[in-house]
Image: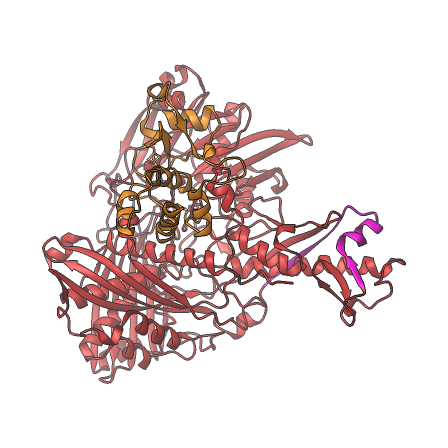
Chain colours: A orange, B red
Amino acid sequence: MLLDALREQLHLTGTKKGCDHGQCGACTVHIDGQSALSCLTLAVMSEGRAITTIEGLARGEELHPVQEAFVKHDAFQCGYCTPGQIMAATALVQDRQQRSAAEIREAMSGNLCRCAAYANIIAAIQEAQRA
Amino acid sequence: MVENTGKPLDRVDGRLKVTGAARYSAEWDVPNLAHAAVVSSTVARGSVRALDTAAARAAPGVLAVLSHENAPRLQPLPEKVGGTLFRGEGGMTETRQPLQDTAVHYAGQPLAVVVADTLERARHAASLVRVTYAEQPPELTLKSVSQRSLPETFVGNKDEKLQVTVGDPKAALAAAPVRLERVYESAITHHNPIEPLATIARWEQRNGGEFLTLYDTSRGVENLQEVMATSLGLPKESVQVICPFIGGAFGAKGWLFAPPLLTAMAARLAGRPVKLEWRRQDMFSVAGQRAATHQTLSLGASRDGKLLALQHDTQTHASIMSGYTEPCARVSRMLYAVPNLGFSHQLAHLHLPSPCPMRGPGETVGGWALECAMDELAAELSLDPVELRLRNYADKNPETGKPWSSKHLRECYERGKALIGWDQRNPKPRAMREGNQLVGYGMATTMYPAARRPAEARATLFADGRALVQSATHELGNGAYTIFRQISADGLALPLERVRFELGDSALPAAPTSGGSATTATIGPAALEACRNVLTALKRLAIQQAQSPLHGAAEDAIEARDGRLVLKADASRGEDYAAILRRAKLPLVAATASVKPGEEREQYSFYSFGAVFVKVRVDEASGSIRLARLCAVYDVGRLMNPKTAHSQIIGGVMMGLGATLMEETQYDARTGRAVVRNLADYHVPSLADTPDITVEWLGIPDPHISELGARGIGEIGCVGTPAAITNAVYHATGQRLRSLPLTPDKLLRG
Ligand code: FES
Ligand code: FES
């Protein structure tokens, strides 16, 4: 699986394993710019495609606007679901549409956060899509 | 100097968390690491007749297969650790050590651990192990069980008796003009942190002896160090437990020790470091759970709503090898001024996995039962639910007679009413609609015990002007790195950027398991005291230095200000910390502190309080219940960081919402196997379930808990929310639902 290849072979542990069954979103990465669940993706299927993980989002010291907004709005607590949330959110905001809170609720419901930072995740995404 | 404590600062570990750089337990890059997979029991009761591991051992890449046949002999767990009773009825954890015999006590019990060079090969080999059982019919329900007990105390705490009678509740109930007896039931629920349990174990030779390093998802590194050392027959110094980040715990990851013990044994057998990551489905068998409860609430009152008697009797269950008892009367024992008070807890032993604390242990489901019964009583008396609570307001603890350390619950009710628009609602049930949905308002009181425990810390000032403060506490999303850095920076009179706070390592100064909403009240004062002690050491250095502007000054004439030691009377006379160290040719100066709560614990009763008001929408056609709005006001003392505190409180609220509307683990009634064992079937609240939430706090410091005035906030959000929602459903529909979770089928059944 792509998730195990990332974590165990490449030691890119920013991508998280929460369920291994496509049910929590913790393992979300971008494949060719679209968000994808790496626990349901075979590594061999991804050959020749561009994969971005949470480690590849910031430019050096400069955080991606979604990362900035997550910190500012305290859109996490334990931080374990956070890379997946941020990868899903960055894929969502890249079309530069201004989504309502209701639309964000719907679009992000596949990413579970047991710390339930949800209210702050909505605020962070709303700020990031204005950026 | 700007104070940091009390400021809504961004989390100092935020950057690590949003870039994927925070390292969780399964993520340590240990050389030569092997991987483990577990073979679990498919039956709930009986014994292993034969375990055929030949095919597994012959499979490619397999290094070892650990089972009861070759497992190292383990010593029994300690009876008590740090005052917490481990074993026996009412105790915290399992009596039985893993893989020491052939007995099977629940489905999903680990029977063997296969170690291989890769995870895939370990999993494949585990699938080749064949187990034959001598099966017996399991006991799986509270009603039909043959073994029951009446545990004396909750985890050995003398102040928390589980069978109590004050006055004569029986007679008072019989004589009461208004009486109400109701049964409330709650389902088994699971913590399900998004990070599953994981351990990496590494054995080495150090100083001529064995040394074990564990990277474990543990919110009790000291505790686990002691458990591992005792179980494996090692001196405590030969075990180190490391855990700088925990991906959520909520009561799990603290008190069940089979996972790290299995990993340590497997690593010893394989002769290599081993990682054991549990799968999501295993979280329903080895990670602990909140047990189901069956609670009978009896209230007796006068016609004008004065409580005359309260009796709260709980039946709950543990596993065969645990005596953990969900302490359901924690709210009933203290919330209302009632002269005749009784409660009991009856514990059944079932062939199910072991329970353990889960956010608001006892309070969440026990408080739900009490606050629902109070709502029923208010309806019976035609009283406003808030008014009924005010008529029974407790000015002192009704069980012990002690005064409260600080209680401002009246203000919480008032403010909460205003926020939700309580007086604007039509109080009649089934009287409010929006479109084709019924609308209801409900409220409940919430509380949480304000514990404080002994702890140690160390503060170090370096000659380059930086500082480090350390204590073996934990970061589990509670903001520990942030708030203890804030507190330490103030304690040292240094800017935040110059101070670091380290935690999550059993080699650091001792701290208790992070739980019971006690971390801030416990570690904060220890960090402050260590800071004071290191400044005292620095003052003494300066006083002795002939060239120091502070030479010869009296110690108490000197104070720390903006990174300098100066004379209180003349701040221009002084110098910065680094100058003193450089002159003394010292790279650093360090001091420790060991603090514990004092006599105030005997004098006062320490609790946080709050009032929760909600609005729900009910669709009677589908039976679905949605929480539309929640307004809650808390009296939790002074907050160290309102930003992280707000997150923690709404996180608690959402977990309360989950327990109320959706969370339930079912076990097959015949086989005892978990039927619900993944995140598609076990519903936790998602973004779509998030209501409009307004959370406020009074911000009144507790004058007695510590100099910081801070009580804990980890659990109070979870308590109260379930009853407020359930009472709102009654207001919306006229139906009393008395079984959690309030799933659509129950509403439709009526
Ligand atoms: S780990 Fe991939 S969705 Fe949960
Ligand atoms: S921040 Fe802990 S699970 Fe989302």
Which quadrant is home to the C terminus of chain B? bottom left
Camera-side residue of B355 and B502: B502
Magenta stretch containing residue B592, yes or no?
yes
Residue B685 shows in the view: no
The magenta region covers B574-596
Using the image, determine if residue A53 lies above or below residue B345.
above
Label total for image? 0
Q: Is residue B239 left or right of residue B445?
A: right
Q: Is residue B664 left or right of residue B237?
A: left
Q: Quadrant of the N terminus of chain B?
A: bottom right
What residue is at 23 percent from the left and 81 percent from the top?
B176
In this view, A74 is above or below B161:
above
Q: Is residue B131 visible?
A: yes
Instruction: Verify whether residue B567 appears in magenta.
Output: no
> Which quarter of the figure has residue B206?
top right
Give x and y (percent) for residue B108: 32, 36
Q: Quadrant of residue B171?
A: bottom left
Most extreme residue toward the right, as rendered?
B546
- The one nearer the camera, B489 or B570, is B570
* Between B538 and B295, the one nearer to me in the picture: B538
Q: Is residue B600 left or right of residue B741?
A: right
Up-down: is B462 above or below B155? above
Q: Nearer the viewer, residue B445 or A116?
A: A116
Q: Position of residue B573 (x, y in %)?
A: 81, 65
The percent position of residue B303, horizontal first and vertical second, equals 22, 84
In what quadrant does ligand 1 lie? top left
